[in-house]
Amino acid sequence: MTTEISTSADADLAALLEEVREFLAEREGESALMALDDEPDLTTGPEAELLRAEAQIQMAEDFDEALITLERAARAKADPASVATLYKRVRMADVNLKKQASLLSWITERLDDADLAVSLAKLQMRREQPTLAERAANRALDIDPGMPEAHRALYVAILRSETPERAVDAIREALVVARRNPRYPAIMSTLAGMEPSEADALKTEMIDHWPESLGRHLRVGDLDIRNDADFKPEANGVYRLALQGQRDDALAKAEDMIERKQGRGLSAQDEVMAEVLTLLPGPQDRKRPLVEDTNAEVIASEPSQTGVTLLCFTDLTHRLNYDFEVIDAFAARSGAATLFLRDHSFRLFIGGIGSLASDRAGTIAAIKDKLADLKTERLLVMGLSSGGFSAISYARELGAEKVLGLSVATSIGRFLRGDDRRARMLIARLNRSFAPEELDLNAVLPTIDSQCPVDLYYGINNATDRGHSEDIGGLPGVTLHPMEGHARHQVLPDLIRRGTFQAFLDS
């Protein structure tokens, strides 16, 4: 008797599931779901749950419910490949991250799908679970050791871990087995956190293994070290045309470039490119030749014709949003001199500049000599991002007239991205090299007699940059200039568009 009941139930279930499949084939998800809900006693097994999930996905009303259904199917020991197929249809939807991670973990444990394992790693990073993200990335690499995306995911997970220095080993492993360049994000911050000789060796290996990403200069992720001073990427080629006096050609090229970038996101520089090109002084508007950037730590113009010198401290990419020639053109309009500083040791100028002196005091003395050579009577100082940290203190020690700070870093503990761990290797290196009181402007500035005015500009909607500036906003001589509507780190392009930068130079 029991066998007959069981056989009858199996037949009823088979008929029901066939009916549901027909509904789904006709894209009638609601009818399929109603049929399943009408027979709850028959529809608790893996096949029924998979059909229920497909019906919910077809209806596209509640993807979270579909995710829950797929979890039930997994618990009922559904075929992992079938669960994965349906999961891929909901993974881009706005669904519960924890439940999604749980289901995807179940799938990747049972299915050799490296793409899904990388997806899980990214998902765990969104959940701020770097240990679980690292486990998922390693699972992807177990399946496909050469997968670049898996190497990138592993690197990111390690950077967010409590031991970010392991990222270097991850890069070295990728150099051996990755099929192509993983295009690591924040690679410059990672290299900056290494000892210079080790970083140089790693850069050389990267150049040897991934030449397709280098061109005529090194550019990997956000690392930008120019090897050829004459090389200009496309955007800078636009500015070069304007600097040569071909403004109309520059504007036409800029319009075409920006049109092609629409939909892929425009940078702060892109958004105001046409206006900046219009304002950029051409040859007929300049009273002296432009500087030639050779990628040296110290780049100086001809002596000042007005007694004014602009001293610039670059960010970690050794730039000022724009190439030096663009910044220099605005100074050359009046005949003011410029002195551009880089710190190739990635120590934020705190210990001085190696090519000038072995320490900060010697660097200050060397800069004074160079300022004298430039016939400086009035010193203006500008610092960008990480370079702003030392720009403010150097300016006051050098007797500057005023300082322009752009999205500056004011304390190493908050440096770059606050709690974001991508900069933790660099922070650790700075902490090893300098005393705590040297790494916070709240401690540094009160020890300097000068209180020359410091104007700090930052995007009011950029929490990190706002926090940095507000940290020293109460110190004498410091004035905050929050820029309404701004969330980006780059503010110089808009200050040029507004004329604020030019007014700083000319006042």
Image (cartoon, rainbow, N blue to C red):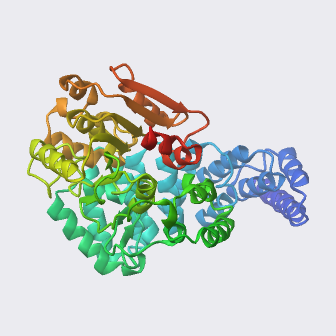
Quarter holding residue 465: top left
- Along the horizontal axis of the image, is 228 left or right of 362? right
Is residue 77 among what the camera can see? no
Q: Residue at x 56, y 46 (%)?
A: 494
Question: Residue 204, percent across and down?
Answer: 24, 74
**Depth check, front residue: 477 or 99:** 477
For the C terminus, the quadrant is top left
Quarter holding residue 182: bottom left
Q: Is residue 352 above or below residue 469?
A: below
Q: Is residue 358 above or below residue 208?
A: above
Is residue 268 among what the camera can see? yes
**Depth check, front residue: 229 or 442:** 229
Question: Residue 442, percent across and down?
Answer: 27, 25
Q: Residue at x 51, y 59 (%)?
A: 281
- Along the horizontal axis of the image, is 123 left or right of 505? right
Q: Residue at x 26, y 48 (%)?
A: 426
Question: Residue 471, percent across and down?
Answer: 37, 25
What is the total number of numbered labels drawn onto the structure image?
Answer: 0
Question: Residue 151, percent across and down?
Answer: 39, 66
Q: Residue at x 24, y 64 (%)?
A: 296
